[in-house]
Image (cartoon, grey):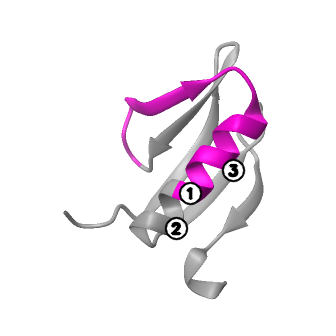
Amino acid sequence: MTAPSSIRVVARGNQWAVKREGKTLCIRCFTTQYDAIDYARALAARLRTKLVIEARGGNIVDKYSPLLQ
């Protein structure tokens, strides 16, 4: 399995979704942004890819790369 270019945390209605960049389906949804970021950070580290965190408006608020840790 090839690693996706990045994992993203995005707002989806009243929830926060973890999804692969460029895909419409989410990997998993959470009620809080904190839980979504926690799950996405572990997933990005396991897949050795970047994590991009978006605010509700779609602006990028943070980036994380396990390769730089």
- The image shows residue 18 at horizontal and vertical percentages of 53, 39
Outermost residue to the left: 1
Indicate yes or no whether the magenta region holds residue 65: no
Q: Residue at x 76, y 46 (%)?
A: 59
- Left or right: residue 41 versus residue 27 is right
Q: CA distance from mark 2 to mark 3?
A: 15 Å
Q: Mark 2 = which residue?
A: 45
Which one is nearer the viewer's eye here, 44 or 7? 44
Find disc 3 in the rendering and name its residue. Answer: 53
C-beta proximity under 8 Å, tags 2 and 1: yes
Q: The residue under label 2 is which amino acid type?
A: Ala
Camera-side residue of 59 and 46: 46
Disc tally is 3
Q: Nearer the viewer, mark 2 or mark 3?
A: 2
Labels 2 and 3 touching (C-beta < 8 A): no
Q: Which residues are magenta?
A: 22-42
The spot of residue 23 in percent (x, y) is 36, 40
Q: Is residue 24 above or below residue 62?
A: above
Q: Give the left or right position of residue 57, taking residue 37 as reference.
A: right
Residue type marked 1: Ala
